[in-house]
Image: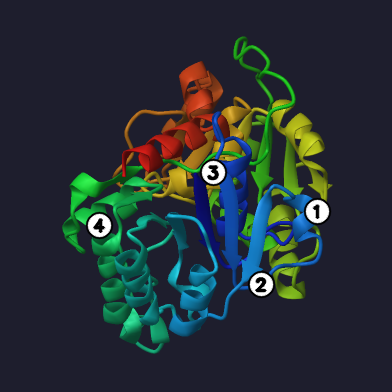
Amino acid sequence: MRICHIVPSVPPEYNGLGDYAFQLCRHWPEPRPGWEILARRLPEGAKEHWPEASMRTFESSGRGLADALGQSSARTVVLHYVGYAYAKRGAPLWLPGTLAAWKANTGGRLIVIFHELYAVGPPWSSPFWLLPLQMRVAKRLAAIGDAWTTSCPDYLRVLRERLRVDMSKGGMIPIGTNIEPVRGPKPARPWPSMLKIVVFGLPLTRLRTLRCHRNLLGRVRQRGLIEKLVLIGRSEAARDVQEATNAILDSIGCETATGYDLEPADISALLLDSHVGLLHNSCGTMTKSGVFAAYCTHGLVTVVPQDGLCERGPFVVSDDAAPDASIEALVRGDGIPTEEDRRRLLFETVSARFAEVCSKV
């Protein structure tokens, strides 16, 4: 058996689609299939990073993908889908027809992973006007595919209620963590009176997260509950992003530290030494976040913004309308992940679930 993944790029260049494909294959249960990768671009070092996979590039067009698929011996194709990964305006109209023709010619099976469905924006932006085309592509891909998955409740709801796809062919598998714990989390109790709080992600993600939770952070600092605020991720940032980040940190006024450009094992050690992780994704989209997966698998309580959809889980809701309730939840240590929560977001579990999808189509 061979499985072919279609992605925009692969590690060591970071993008969520290529890395997700790599992690799926790396943690696939035995027996493992042969891997083929069709990517729009292959960065330097790709083959050394992923020696088990046969890789080739394809031009982002119907003819380009058809030619590349024609050279593949795989009869199971997995499309990692974000519209903007394959078309400048986010609507690769050529993609569904090309994959439908491949299926008809080969009798092959297609599985679509909807990492995103479409983009939205104000009337003066192109996503606003191209939304119908982006929706049409996503809906047709779901119809062509023998199976599909997505990663969060929001996307599942859109697929069901707005795109009205065949729900019997699909379901939700959350994103797993690509930062594997170097050891098990320390005991959750006793919960400390002073908290180490983490903001993890790319520079712009960290800025969005700080903006989202600055009021809560300010109140927590005023109550003397922050031991340290730790920023983790890449150091290189646009000047305006760095200036805005520094301004928020100055306004909060707590002790800060950075863990920039670290190896995964060192990131894991920092997470294991912390208590709380801040996330800008809401409850409806947090399971599409690798940051949430990293927090959860390392035993951190995740703080998410209120979106009206939150139920109980390994998180605390940061609600500006009721900030004291959020603070008291942090003081108590509410939302500590269970062993089941942590295992669910390890790629070992995610890969096993996806392998089961592949085996059933």
Instruction: Give the Cα distance between marks 4 and 2.
Output: 29 Å
In the picture, the disc for residue 216 is: 3
Picture quarter containing residue 131? bottom left
Query: What's the residue at 53%, 63% (across, down)?
Result: 72
Image spot of residue 43 (x, y percent): 75, 67
Instruction: Give the Cα distance between marks 1 and 2.
Output: 15 Å
Of the two numbered discs 3 and 4 on the same chain, state the one appearing first in sequence.
Answer: 4
Query: What's the residue at 72%, 74% (across, down)?
Result: 240
Query: What's the residue at 31%, 45% (across, down)?
Result: 361
In the picture, the disc for residue 73 is: none
Image spot of residue 31 (x, y percent): 54, 31
In the picture, the disc for residue 159 is: 4
Of 92 and 184, the residue lying toward us: 92
Q: Nearer the viewer, mark 4 or mark 2?
A: 2
Q: Amino acid at mark 4?
A: Leu
Of the two numbered discs 2 and 3 on the same chain, state the one appearing first in sequence.
Answer: 2
Of 220 and 35, the residue lying toward us: 35
Residue on which disc 1 sits = 48
Q: Amino acid at mark 1?
A: Glu
Q: Please, is residue 301 above or below residue 97 in the view?
A: above
Q: Please, is residue 274 above or below residue 262 in the view?
A: above
- For the residues labelled 3 and 1, say whether their Cβ atoms are less than 8 Å apart: no
Query: What's the residue at 26%, 79% (across, down)?
Result: 132
Q: Nearer the viewer, mark 3 or mark 4?
A: 4
Residue on which disc 2 sits = 41
Of the two numbered discs 3 and 1 on the same chain, state the one appearing first in sequence.
Answer: 1
Q: Amino acid at mark 2?
A: Arg
- For the residues labelled 2 and 3, say whether their Cβ atoms are less than 8 Å apart: no
Instruction: Give the Cα distance between marks 3 and 4.
Output: 34 Å
